[in-house]
Image (cartoon, rainbow, N blue to C red):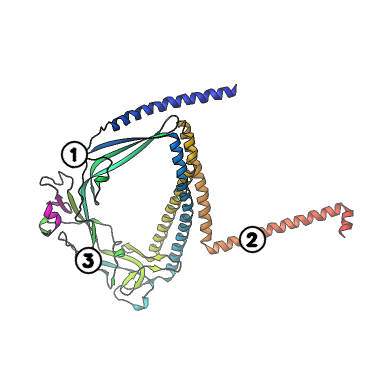
Amino acid sequence: RSSRIIVLRFYKLIIISISKYQNMSEELGDESGTANAGEGYYGNGGGEGGTYTEVQNESYFSGIGNSFAGICFGIILFIGAFPLLWWNEGRAVDYYQAISEGKQIIVPIDTTTINSANEGKLVYLTGLAEPTDNVMDTDFGVEATMKTRLFRDVEMYQWKETKSTRKKKNVGGGTTTVTEYLYSKSWSSTLIDASTFKTSGYTNPTFMPYSSEDFYPTAVVVDAFTLPTDLVNGISSLTPLEGTLNVTDIPSNNLLVQSMTEQSYINGFYFGATNSSSYLNEVIGDTRVTYLATEGGQVSIIAMQTGATLDPYTASSGANLYLIEPGIVSSEQMFENAKASNKTITMILRFVGFIVMATGIGLILAPISAVADIIPCIGDCVGAAVSIVAGLIAAAFSLTVIGIAWVANRPIILVIGGGVLAGLFLLLYSGYRTKQNKSRALNLTENPKDFEMAR
């Protein structure tokens, strides 16, 4: 009787699943008919955009075949996660050791003079970072006073394609994939090739005469020391360039001036593709050029002195120390900040390694849920179970690799741990031998004949 109840419940479950997914199939059929009929809005350079829907059906056996094909990629991800996790632990230890070494050898220096005795040493300095001259963008005639960096941001108004995909499982296996392509206008700092769009009717310019670029003064100095570019970039964050820029300062040989209509714009210039276009009436092909800049100011630096400049210091662990922070910050605090940053990066990479491994295991186990997809609701349950199992297996392997790598990259702990394990083994072995000897002595005492023979 109980088996009959189970069969009836299973049959009811199948009927419910069929009814549910038939309704989904009907909805998808309507969408497919719309797409195949070619309906949908096809925009152009002056239109308002639109969408295009594409429906693709994958058979049950095709889905199983694709899941088996994904096993190879899953194996690659699974295996690749191991060296990633191992390398991350080694990187973290190397940088931690570099910080510890840096604390012992750091040399505070006076920035007003270059002391050759500090050549090649790890030094700590503070002072006012300031440019030696103004920074210029000669292409647009822009000159910024007392800035350590000038960033030109060039963007063009273009069509862009955004793709979204949703999948629905069908009764009897197979999957229907509905992909919707959304077309809209947006500002982009790179050219968007409209010829690669899924549907025609949209065109973008094929040439962008100027690109985004950084500009620097001849030098940025802290008293007698000249800062390299990578340290200059760490002085402060970019902020909009203050002041109004005049379009009359743009050179006449500027390609945008020659082909477009120039206008003043917030922190920059606006170039209209047509006489009627402006930042209030944007048209495909319009270009805007805006400027950001960084100020000088007090900075604190930890680096290696190399002549009158500064370079990364390579510690005995192989990791580099090369730190800059705005304001007056003590060397002790800078090392603590670097240590905290190292911990954050380590945790992020551990999580990335876990995700890579879990994804790989999920692909390896994917055929299980693909086979179960013949009944969609069961396939969903099996898929969820596979995801949970993949996560648990990945967590176990990740923690194991992290634990072994953590110990392996710390020789002292490895030696102490090995000694403790060896001691425990000898203690257990000694106890085992003692127990055996006592047991043997007891047996000989209880059997005098065996005792005489033993003598």
Which residue sits at x=31%, y=29%? 33
Q: Nearer the viewer, residue 438 or 320?
A: 320
Question: Label 1 sits on what residue type?
Answer: Gly
The reply to whether residue 244 is visible in this rendering is no
Q: CA distance from mark 1 to mark 2?
A: 77 Å
Q: Does 1 appear above or below 219?
A: above
Residue linked to disc 1: 47
The image's mark for residue 422 is 2
Amino acid, disc 2: Ala
Give the percent coordinates (x, y) of residue 367: 48, 40
State whether residue 298 appears in this view: yes
Q: For this rendering, which residue is in front, 203 or 7?
A: 203
Q: Does the stretch in magenta take in 76? A: no
Q: Label 2 to label 3, Cα distance in Å?
A: 63 Å
Instruction: Give the quadrant of the C terminus.
Output: bottom right
Location of the N terminus by quadrant is top right
Q: Is 41 above or below relative to 101?
A: above
Towards the viewer: 405 or 126: 405
Q: Position of residue 376 (x, y in %)?
A: 45, 31
Helix, strand or loop at label 1? It is loop
Determine which residue is flagged by label 3. Answer: 217
Bounds of the magenta segment: 250-278
Disc on the earlier residue, 2 or 3: 3
